[in-house]
């Protein structure tokens, strides 16, 4: 059940709501005129000097940027509201939250709303438009295809639906919800997903801790599908995977697809080590690319069971690829002490810096892990190293961390390639916080 708490977080100045006028949406030229046709629509007025960042497109209006709220009665969580500058001129509209530190998620700026009157102040129609655009974008990128049936359909702010992520795995759509509005419009979202001809099942995976900060207490939730799937088979770059729908995040890291493909292209005849291998994505690509031998390391037994199953699914030679349950740091220290080296090492640790306040400690962990990885990379060999911590990526410190790791290891590095998430994970430049994955391919000397 959903319980929405609505404590007051902002000072609300109640005045008479906008009165209806004879102006209709069909003839309106401004968002203010369109709003005049809607009774009881509140207006969130921004502080002086706080407008430009949102006018430029940042969708997350934090409470500290708000000067006052005009409306009677005050808006409730989930209500559509106008967002206005200090002169009370609307700059856009969005969905209000009385509890979250982000009191409004902007959905449309005025310029777009007045160009497309059908979607102005209409969340259902806006959802339809945004879904259609997302589907068309993936089609233009060749997704899905015969070789790849796992991809991201909606990437939150990158697809202008802040708080909503949808990954498609074969005939299953996995919805990751991290905003109150997503839960409110659950039935509409599922309706749009079901219009996709290949989707037969929907798996809903709410981010419970984040939703608590949004004022939602999700104590019990069942999927709308009668069949409770736990696993699904997908193809990525021609490789078959068994995906656990109860696994990490949405179950599969489609963001690394293009980086995994690169590994398949450069692994022929090489000895490859995949550290933090999870279900074997990089290791399997190395095996497909003709690696002499591949070993994957992870501390999770369920992840390694999936990896072993994926080897069998693809009928790879088990003498060419294997997996070991071991702590990554312990394994690399032991390998370094024995002076064991690999031609290619992949280091893809879990998120070590979920928040900026732990950035310093996480930086030390990344430095130590990468230093060990460099020590066990053959001189002249390659290290593909990753950070999925948004705080690290956005701070711009990852390269400096890698330089420190090289110094600690007594090695020299050169950059061959820098990349991020796959192209089905678009990023809105007005919301750089959406960038989280950094991937470097290094030559280690």
Image (spheres, helix red, strand yellow):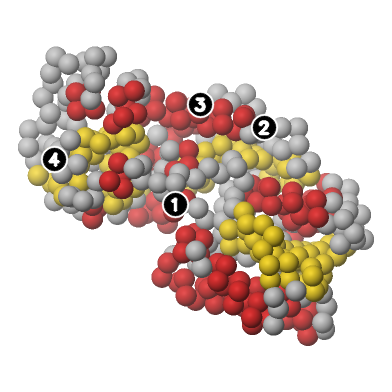
Q: Residues within 10 Å of mark 1 (few under 14, many from 20)?
A: some
Residue at 50% x, 53% y: name it: 435
Query: Which is in the foreground here, disc 2 or disc 4?
Result: 4
Examine the image and state in which quarter residue 184 appears. Answer: top left
- The C terminus lies in which quarter of the figure? bottom right
Name the residue that disc number 3 marks. 132
Looking at marks 2 and 1 on the same chain, the residue that comes earlier in the sequence is marked by: 2
State the CA–CA distance, disc 3 to disc 1. Answer: 24 Å
Q: Is residue 313 visible?
A: yes
Q: Position of residue 131 (x, y in %)?
A: 49, 30
State the CA–CA distance, disc 4 to disc 3. Answer: 35 Å
**Total number of numbered discs in the rendering:** 4
Name the residue that disc number 4 marks. 87
Examine the image and state in which quarter residue 59 appears. Answer: top left
Looking at marks 4 and 1 on the same chain, the residue that comes earlier in the sequence is marked by: 4
Numbered tag placed on residue 142 in the rendering? 2
Q: Is residue 158 left or right of residue 387?
A: left
Which element type, helix, strand or loop, lies under badge 1?
Answer: helix
State the CA–CA distance, disc 2 to disc 3. Answer: 15 Å
- The N terminus lies in which quarter of the figure? top left
Query: Which is in the foreground here, disc 4 or disc 3?
Result: 4
Which element type, helix, strand or loop, lies under badge 3?
Answer: helix
Q: Is residue 305 above or below residue 363?
A: above
Looking at marks 3 and 1 on the same chain, the residue that comes earlier in the sequence is marked by: 3
State the CA–CA distance, disc 2 to disc 1. Answer: 26 Å
Residue at 56% x, 27% y: name it: 136
Examine the image and state in which quarter residue 340 appears. Answer: bottom right
Name the residue that disc number 1 marks. 432
Looking at marks 2 and 4 on the same chain, the residue that comes earlier in the sequence is marked by: 4
Q: Is residue 35 visible?
A: no
Looking at marks 4 and 3 on the same chain, the residue that comes earlier in the sequence is marked by: 4
Q: Position of residue 261 (x, y in %)?
A: 74, 49
């Amino acid at each position: 059940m959903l319980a929405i708490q609505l404590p007051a977080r902002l000072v609300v100045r109640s005045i008479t709501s906008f009165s209806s006028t004879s102006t209709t949406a069909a003839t309106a030229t401004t968002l203010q005129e369109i709003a005049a046709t809607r009774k009881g629509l509140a207006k969130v007025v921004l502080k002086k000097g706080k407008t430009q960042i949102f006018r430029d497109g940042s969708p997350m209006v934090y409470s500290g940027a708000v000067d006052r709220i005009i409306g009677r009665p005050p808006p409730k969580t989930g209500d559509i509201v106008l967002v206005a500058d200090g002169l009370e001129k609307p700059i856009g509209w969005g969905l209000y939250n009385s509890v979250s530190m982000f009191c409004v998620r902007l959905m449309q700026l005025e310029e777009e709303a007045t160009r497309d009157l059908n979607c102005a102040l209409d969340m259902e129609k806006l959802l339809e438009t945004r879904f259609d655009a997302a589907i068309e974008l993936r089609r233009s990128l060749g997704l899905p295809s015969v070789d790849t049936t796992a991809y991201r359909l909606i990437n939150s702010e990158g697809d202008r639906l802040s708080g909503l992520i949808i990954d498609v795995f074969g005939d299953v759509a996995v919805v990751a919800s991290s905003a109150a509005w997503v839960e409110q419009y659950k039935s509409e979202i599922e309706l749009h997903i079901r219009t996709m001809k290949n989707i037969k099942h929907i798996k809903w995976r709410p981010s419970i801790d984040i939703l608590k900060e949004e004022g939602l207490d999700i104590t019990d939730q069942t999927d709308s599908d009668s069949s409770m799937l736990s696993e699904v088979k997908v193809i990525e770059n021609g490789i078959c995977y068994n995906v656990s729908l109860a696994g990490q995040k949405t179950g599969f890291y489609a963001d690394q697809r293009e980086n995994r493909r690169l590994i398949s292209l450069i692994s022929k005849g090489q000895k490859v080590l995949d550290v933090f291998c999870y279900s074997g994505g990089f290791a399997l690509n190395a095996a497909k690319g003709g690696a002499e031998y591949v070993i994957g390391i992870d501390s999770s037994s369920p992840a390694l069971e999936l990896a072993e199953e994926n080897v069998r699914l693809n009928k790879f030679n088990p003498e060419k690829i294997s997996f070991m349950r071991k702590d990554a740091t312990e394994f690399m220290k032991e390998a370094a002490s024995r002076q064991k080296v690999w031609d290619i090492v992949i280091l893809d640790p879990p998120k070590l810096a979920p928040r900026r306040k732990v950035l310093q400690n996480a930086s030390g962990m990344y430095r130590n892990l990468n230093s060990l990885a460099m020590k066990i990379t053959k001189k002249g060999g390659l290290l593909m190293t990753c950070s999925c911590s948004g705080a690290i990526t956005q701070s711009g410190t990852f390269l400096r961390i890698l330089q420190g790791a090289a110094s600690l290891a007594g090695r020299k590095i050169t950059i061959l390639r820098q990349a991020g998430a796959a192209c089905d994970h678009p990023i809105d430049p007005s919301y750089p916080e959406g960038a989280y994955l950094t991937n470097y391919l290094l030559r280690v000397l």
